[in-house]
Amino acid sequence: MDPTLTVLLHFINAFKQSLKYYMTLLQGMVLLLTPLKSLSERLETDPACNLYLSSHKGNSIENG
């Protein structure tokens, strides 16, 4: 087999492996961040959570 072709095949395989690695890493990040995003949306839209958060920040209705 031609040495140039061998080097090219090794380079392509290494590129495919690194692409697989980064895609897996990206999927993991998405899986980790999705619940956080939905939780933050829920905290913003749910009146009970919003009132709870505002009362603990010192910005409740009683504190003016």
Image (cartoon, rainbow, N blue to C red):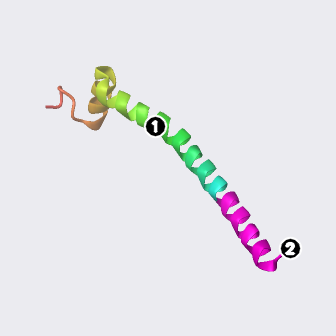
Residue 19, position in %: x, y?
63, 57
Q: Quadrant of residue 5?
A: bottom right
Residue type for callout 2: Met
Instruction: Classify residue 39 as left or right of residue 30.
Output: left
Instruction: Classify residue 39 as left or right of residue 49.
Output: right
Considering every residue shown, the one lying at the far front of the view is: 2
Relative vertical location of residue 3 with respect to residue 49 in this rendering, above or below = below
User: What secondary structure predominates along the stretch shown in magenta?
Assistant: helix
Could you classify mark 1 by the number of other residues whose Cα lies within 10 Å: few (under 14), some (14-19), or many (20 or more)?
few
Residue 11, position in %: x, y?
71, 69
The mark found on residue 36 in the picture is 1
Task: Tell me where the magenta segment starts and ends, as one range.
Answer: 1-18
| Quadrant that contains the N terminus | bottom right
Q: CA distance from mark 2 to mark 1?
A: 52 Å
Residue depicted at x 26% and y 32%: 54
Residue 47, position in %: x, y?
28, 21
Q: Quadrant of residue 31?
A: top right
